[in-house]
Amino acid sequence: MNKKLITLAVAAAMAAPAAALAEATLYGEAHVSLDYANVNNVILPTYGFVANEDGSIYIDPNGYPVFQKLDNGVDFEGWGMSSRGYIPGVTRASRLGVKGSEDLGGGLKAIYQIELEINFNDGQQFVEGDAVNRDGGVIGQDGNVVSNYDSITYRNTFVGLAGNFGTVLFGRHDTPMKISTAKLDLFTDTMADYNGTVGFRDLRADNVVAYISPNWRGFQLAGAVIPPGGATAGSGLNLNSDGIAEGYSLAAIYSNGPFYASAAYESLGDELFNDQYTSVNMSNCDYVGAFPHNPTLLDSPYDGTGGFYGCDYTSEDATAWRFGLGLLDWNGFTLTGIYESRDQEPGSDTFFAYSDPADSALSWSIPGAAQDVDLWQIQAGYAFGNNMIKAMYGEASFDSNVYLGSQFVANHGGAGFADYATTPVDYDRSTWGVGFDHNFSKRTKAYVLYTEVDDDREDYVAGTDWSGFSLGLLHKF
């Protein structure tokens, strides 16, 4: 995760002498950590109807079948390295890059950057003989992984122009919203990073066209649009994902001495979350009361009186506001705060419905995700000599307009979908962490930290509730 405010503008390159600008600069960061984590329910508990001794479903005195947890989940507790395997949190973001610029005359420069993220390990256990690893990669007889997630990926990689008008970039890059609070995270790229704990939505997007204004006494504007060309956010191709600004991000940043403030807005178009079939054929699927508009979708009557219907069409843009404030390195003290509000989370339109034509009061629907999210975090640190002590606390609240209890589903023929009803659509998360940094030099740092995440979904979503200890070493070159 690139946490440099003006990486987008390559400001350092722009300020260098012209002779140096013509040459490529090799740079990078090597970051590893030894981690210990206790992760609850990496294998989830089993839910189902309580059975009598003869195998029939138990009916309580009120005439309801009883649906409950049948066994406990399985936890992971152990050692790992750099957020791999079951170790939670974000990656350590080791990287290798080359950047530079060319003076084109008249105050205009061409700039470029190619940056790769290099994972020192991929979290897999190499064993003798054929096996299937945790992520589905097949390990052959020779020990080579045939299918696995990449060990090398692209980070911010772009080409652009810079001048008195500002900077324009084309390529892959962090969005302005991500950049707007990058300086405010004292735990960046560690187990306690605010993305992996609180859950802020930081994006690095492909197909970015970005503009960054000149610096006016510490004040800057940044904006970016995403023309996807039919690409989506993990849903394959979609011919309706065709706008020049299918996604866009805007930020205003003030950074002057120890004072820092930012405001950002980001919108991800609905078509970025629809696959092509859904976008073309199911756009008439939405809510009418508790019923989907099109009752033929996945119509599979359960008890002869109604049917279950599924709808995964996303009809609303996913939007977010973010505000940041910071007092940075003021006589050694740092204090930061971030607030983010998101509407129409991706997947919140997805729902399952049961329609009873004889009695509409018995019909129900369940959204696939929380619709609204509010997140905040405060961080504090004090630097003395080559050391810093730091701490953070944050919370997140995920809310939906619809929630259905499992007892109601069980009572009205919803056995096949009861697992969806037991997943809380409204839930909260809290997190805290403490850490100590020691700088051997300006380029080499060691740290130790401890962090916890308490999530209401621990019995329903694997690995959301955890705690961890991390001992890390970072070197920049």
Image: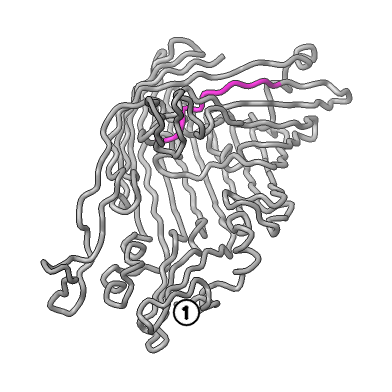
Query: Quick check: 274 left or right of 325?
Result: right
Does any portion of residue 13 appear in the rendered image? yes
Q: Name the spot of residue 24 as percent of width and height, x first.
A: 72, 16
Choose between 440 and 41: the one closer to the eye: 41
Choose between 130 and 315: the one closer to the eye: 130
Display colour scheme:
one colour
The kind of residue tagged 1 is: Gly
Q: Is residue 191 above or below residue 303?
A: above
Q: Is residue 90 magenta?
A: yes
Q: Name the spot of residue 335 as percent of width and height, x first.
A: 43, 33
Query: Quick check: 311 left or right of 465?
Result: right
Quarter of the rendering occupied by the C terminus: top right
Q: How many labels does the image show?
A: 1
Q: Is residue 343 magenta?
A: no
Q: Is residue 433 above or below residue 372?
A: above
Answer with the quarter of the image where residue 173 lies. Answer: top right
Q: Give the range drawn in magenta.
A: 89-99
Does any portion of residue 436 appear in the rendered image? no
Q: Is residue 337 above or below residue 403?
A: above
Please rate how many residues cluster around mark 1, counting C-alpha atoms within 10 Å: few if below 14, some from 14 to 19, many from 20: few
What residue is shown at x 33% (from left), y 72% (from top)?
414
What residue is shown at x 44% (from left), y 24% (from top)?
143
Answer with the quarter of the image where residue 380 lies. Answer: top left
Which residue has dot 1 on it? 289
Answer with the quarter of the image where residue 26 lies. Answer: top right
What residue is shown at x 34% (from left), y 26% (from top)?
80
What residue is shown at x 34% (from left), y 65% (from top)?
421
Q: Name the spot of residue 209 as percent of width and height, x first.
A: 72, 42
